[in-house]
Image (spheres, helix red, strand yellow):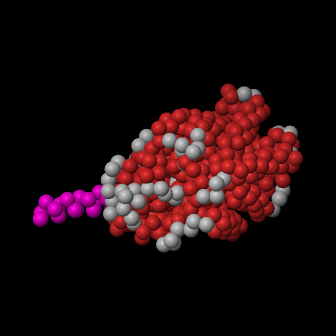
Amino acid sequence: MITSFVVFLLMFLGIGILSAFKATGKKNDYYLAGRHVAPWLAGLSAVATNNSGFMFIGVIGFTYSTGLAAIWLMVGWILGDFLASLFVHKRLREVSASVNEVSFGGALSRWDGGFQPTFRKIAALITIIFLGAYAAAQFKAGGKALHSLLGWDLQTGAIVGSLIVAVYCLSGGIRASIWTDAAQSIVMIVAMALLLVVTTVHFGGPADAWDQMNEIPGFLSLYPEGSLFQPEWLSFGLFVTGWLFAGLSVIGQPHIMVRFMALDSPEHLSRTRVYYYGWFTVFYAMATMVGLLSRLYITDASGFDAELALPTMAMEMLPPALVGLVLAGIFAATMSTADSLILSCSAAVTHDLFSHRVENIWLIKCATLIVTLLALWIALTDQQSVFRLVIAAWSVLASAFAPLLILKSLGRRIPERLAIAMLLVGVAVDLLWIRAGWNAYIYEGMPGILSGLTVWVSVTWLGRKSAVSY
């Protein structure tokens, strides 16, 4: 088991280090691979980055606890992501190239050819704080996997993952991240498919497994338990719509959108989309099915950490060499996202946070190392679940950036003070929603995004009304 796991880790590390031979030592190459990434690489990298340890650990744990109603996460997430991609991704690629910006916040601040330095700094702070927490969740997911499969201390996996990510990020920057993402995406889907097939056969095939799940009260209900509003159908509708907003929230994630910024041509986005959504749909569907089957295998849900469902099943049902493959798949998922998060944070530090951009490649790599250590520290000290930590970071970033990106992609010019107001109001509403506990019923990014859009509508309407009165 350990041998097969180490072989895969060394493969990922080797691919990342090999990418350094193509590095030019320039910031544009370190953060965007010179904007020469092929469509299939961009697609596989973006989807591996999107799925992360959240899919292996968080989604399967959520499905274990929730039942079939968890399928609405998949439906809403993929649909929302796809709808946003139809009008945002190409425009972002074109604008980032035209203004020669390597960071997500930098592209937003100079979208209309102007310069918004205060907005850029605030955006950088939000990026660093919440992408850092997001990266910590990936290291934490790796720690949980090693703890369950090898009995290691929870902190060990986080340290191992952070060391590997640091080595190949420092070697080849985003090119190392994208190359390893492509390899990791293949290992991830093979590992998930393997566990799905073995588990289904263990329970007598799809029909028998379904009959056994049907015996668990409420497990196959399409309606999630609990209602925030009455009638119940309204609460259910808002639940599903909330996860559609979670998918739309992809456009607010700097670490994913930078993959599309690095694409070799805006005209190749359609091909990239085929790789991205094809892989995404297959993998998410398999993860949901494995989550459902895990409840049959681990029948006593009381006192069990649902986020350990997949590694626990793998350990008990597979031979050691294949357990190593599954463990490598989980680690691949965590690293494919963690490296992207860390590089996006590094870009925010070196190009957005300070008045003068950092151009020296060694200082840029030093910033990458510091961000890695910050994420590791959060992983070792924070007690939240992987699922909640990821969703919280994801939703805050979406509430901050998605409204602006939607409007800018539609050709709306937004003054700096209005952009800042939209960003801060969106983040505040998101955090207050979490604080009130309403995120158990409706994804918190939905009110956050809508509040940012509402600020723009209100200010625009008042401005027009004043102009008419004048």
Q: How many labels does the image show?
A: 0
Residue found at the very far front of the displayed protein: 24
Quarter-wise, where is residue 317 in the image?
Answer: top right
Magenta region, main secondary structure: helix
| Residue at the left extreme of this rendering | 470
Question: Is residue 435 visible in this depiction of the protein?
Answer: no
Q: Does the magenta stretch include residue 438?
A: no
Q: Which residue is drawn at 50% across and 37% down?
A: 268
In depth, the one of 243 and 411 nearer the eye is 411
Q: Tell me what residue is drawn at x 61 percent, y 66 percent.
A: 360
Residue 428: image quadrant is bottom left
142 or 254, nearer to the observer: 254
Please identify the residue farthest to the bottom as the structure is shown.
355
**Depth check, front residue: 425 or 431:** 425
Q: Which stretch appears magenta?
A: 455-470
Residue 175 coordinates in the image, percent (x, y): 64, 50
Give me the residue at 79% from left, 56% from top: 147
Q: Which residue is drawn at 60% across and 50% down?
A: 33
In this picture, residue 448 sits left or right of residue 331: left
Depth check: give the residue in front, 444 or 360: 360
Whether the magenta-drawn stretch holds residue 460 is answered as yes
Return the x and y of residue 186 as percentages of the image width and height.
70, 39
Question: How far across and down, in percent of the image, does residue 463 sit?
Answer: 22, 62
Which of the 4 image quarters holds residue 423? bottom left
The image quadrant where one finds the C terminus is bottom left
Residue 205 visible in this rendered orientation of the protein = yes
- Rendering coords of residue 6 (x, y %): 83, 49
